[in-house]
Amino acid sequence: MFFKKLKECLTGITALWLMAWTGAVHAEWGLNLTRGVTPISHEVYDLHMLILWVVTIIGIGVFSVMFWSILHHRKSKGAVSAKFHHSTTAEIVWTIIPILILVGMAIPATKTLIKMEQTGDADMTIKVTGYQWKWKYDYMDDGLSFFSVLAQDSNDARQPGSNIDLNSIDHYLLDVDQPIVLPINKKIRILTTANDVIHAWWVPALGWKRDAIPGFINDNWIIIEEPGTYRGQCAELCGKDHGFMPIVVKAVPEEEYVAWVKKMKMAKAAAAASGDRDFSKDELMASGKELYSKNCAVCHMAEGQGIPGTFPALAGSAIATTPEGLPDHIDRILHGKNLMPPFGEQLSDADIAAVVTYERNAWGNDTGDVVQPKDIKAAR
Amino acid sequence: MSEAVIHNGHHDHHDHKPYGIGRWLFSTNHKDIGTMYLVFALIMFFVGGAMAMVIRAELFQPGLQFVNPLFFNSMTTIHALVMIFGAVMPAGVGLANWMIPMMIGSPDMALPRLNNMSFWILPFAFTLLLSTFFMPGGAPAGGWTMYPPLVLQLGDGFPFLIFAIHFLGISSILGAINIIATVFNMRAPGMTFMKLPLFVWTWIITAFLLIATMPVLAGSVTMLLTDKFFGTSFFSAAGGGDPVMFQHVFWFFGHPEVYILILPAFGIVSQIIPAFARKPLFGYESMVYATASIAFLSFFVWAHHMFTVGMPLTGELFFMYATMSIAVPTGVKIFNWVATMWKGSMTFETPMLFAVSFVVLFSIGGFTGLMMGITPVDFQYHDTYFIVAHFHYVLVPGAIFALMAGVYFWLPKWTGHMYDERLGKIHFWLSAIFVNMLFFPQHFLGLAGMPRRIPDYNVQFTEWNMVSSIGGFAFGLSQLILVWVVIKCVRGGQKATDQVWEGAHGLEWTLPSPPPFHSFTTPPQVTDATAHS
Ligand SMILES: [Cu+2]
């Protein structure tokens, strides 16, 4: 009631200003926790509502007494102050009653918590690995593995001064290039870990979030009961682009899931086969540009200028412009160094060849170098 | 206890009032140092506030309009450090410096030179911290909690961050030692512990918390320093360490730190409500015991800040139950304040308005705190705007409103002039309205799924962010009124009486307004009649 009242009040006052300022009709005024689509998320939602009501009722009770006192026990109304300053009975009562209420809340909370920890007997296991700033998903049982990054349209629109209308973008900042597809009605164990810093994997509709910690593995479980697309974000501050590593879960019936796994595996095999040939410089530059903006530009920036003091520039740098720099250039991308993560396992030979070629010929780095997939293979 | 007077005689420069810049640089006077603490806190309140304005401007609508994501992260990080260590803590120490000697009937603090040092460390510490904005790699951007491995990615500013924290810790520890030494040794004859005003009680307990936890913070950041520069791997799994261990150690400091910020606020409110209800504080003894239990329990709940790191079930249950149990002594305090008001003869001058709104709005923060203590639900609330709303309710209309209440309450005593009551009331009402407009919608944002510490968001979160930002700008501007009230009051105004407020009792109100340079040169005799109630 308290929340509702305040909501109505605030909505009334501010709706007018906002209409005038934004002309927006996409008003959603989201207010409450989602009920979610897993058995655990339902229990969590019920606990949330229970405790919300408990504190609301206590609050209304205590503050009604206080405001009644404020209205009636005023000097201006001729109130004369009483002299009491102690009452053992009252103090015992208002110590015991809260204890009973707390015990009443602790019991269902304990039950839910115990259930959340029952990660055994899973039908399948997914390993989630946080990277700065993307997610990697390993399907432990189906031998599938891929990275999932912010969708390109959101990424273009989020650049400062992009002037792209954010309402024209589907699920701005909550969309990815490759969602994680999961079957419904299966008990899925989700392992979380990280490669560089701590992240947290959170899809509200699944009922929990869990930290992804480098060097450690956490586990959790879900059973998704309804097909649909569920969106979430990294929840633990993980650096510059913490706000730009969303999570998209697509829950589908089992047959559809099996078909999807098959399709993914075939696509991967096809990509590996096509990478064995040589490419023209134009082909490499075109795909290199795309791969650069997706994987490298977050740190080295769109024009290769880097961020002084944190991320080195590539434009005009020795490593990307001199012949002696070439082996280091390839090695750095394959194996990483300091803050630079290794890309060897997430990009194919053809991809890395394209990126290296692009970086050695873009933004005034006119080396004319053309690097082919076979060069990368030799350097691995 | 006439030793207090003899002790004072050792410092011959106390015999005349110093003047010029030297009065402030070399001050050993509790009132001058208290004033410097308060002015410093006010300046830092506006520095941290300006950063909050940058944050709210960027979040006014989706898309990046003003700052880049890395600078945004620096804003949230430094805003927190400045507000916690630069505004709220020094303001609390400033009030303690001014009021504790007067409340216990002593001439000054027990260790005046130490007092000077603990203040003058602060400007240097903040110069170190804020200078990082001009360094390669920028200012700290890994959150005020400084979690590794992220914090280790910071550029040249890293050692400056660590040493700034060390200095702040030293300053706090010295201040705490001084307060304990003062209260234990310099009370006037007859001022027994159970006659101490509640503000003094809350400060003794706070001082013990500071001494217990600041070294833990210093230790944890030193481990970060050696991990970065000396090849240790306390917090790196690759070297056999554990990044989560930092969080355990940090929050072992961090949770008591929350009470370091709020207990003095409890003390202030416990002085003000009885004064304006013209009725003794209800349950003085249970207030003291409740404060002590809150402080004691604060050492056993740290892991509720990090439920999502993945602890064993028994650990999660222990920290959930321990966290919930803090609601009991906190509830006792709220009920006692309400019972103090009950059947009083109340008037609502500005200090009372701030104190009453503290009781209500702090409780909202307490309620959401209880909600987050429920571990399974915290897995949803954690690291969202719901917790941003929670701790800002506790700290802004909580701690900061109480500090402002204290300033209005004691300003006539300090300056000898009444402040402008009309301006004070305008300041209160604008603050109270806009602080809710600023923070209440953040509950909705968090529940709807907006994570904290992000510079940009999906369009579904636009509306409440706009409301919050408008509230933020208006709240920030309203604080200029406070500055105006204080300046006006220092310069002149209606002459304040010794007692100032009709219902005010205690030794501090027996001194003239403004009080003499050395508060009590002869110790007063405390009887039941002149004690706190
Ligand atoms: Cu992340």
Image: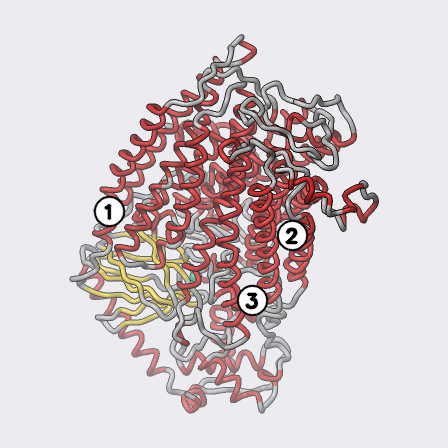
Q: Is residue B81 visible?
A: yes
Across and down, in percent, residue B270 comes to 51, 30
Residue linked to disc 1: A110
In the depicted view, which residue is nearer to us: B167 or B394? B167
Figure check: A109 above or below B236: above
First along the sequence among labels 2 and 3: 2
Q: Quadrant of the N terminus of chain B?
A: top right
Q: SS class of the residue under badge 2?
A: helix
Mark in front: 2 vs 3: 2
Decide which of B393, B249 is in the foreground and name it: B249
Judging by the rendered image, the residue that carries numbered circle 3 is B154
Estimate the x, y position of residue B352 in percent, counting from the top left: 56, 25
Residue type of the residue flagged with mark 3: Leu
Q: Which mark is residue B118?
A: 2
Residues marked 2 and 1, same chain = no
Gap in angstroms between the C-alphas marked 2 and 1: 46 Å
Residue drawn at x 47%, y 36% as measured from the top left: B440
Q: Residue at x 42, y 42 (%)?
A: B294
What residue is rendered at 56% in x and 41% in y? B469
Q: Are marks 3 and 1 on the same chain?
A: no
Question: For the residue labelled by badge 3, is the local secondary structure a helix, a strand or a loop?
Answer: loop
Q: Badge 2: how crowded within 10 Å, few (<14), some, or many (20+)?
A: many
Q: Chain of mark 3?
A: B
**Cα distance in 3D space between marks 3 and 1:** 40 Å
Marks 2 & 3 on one chain: yes
Q: Chain of mark 1?
A: A
Name the amino acid, label 2: Ser
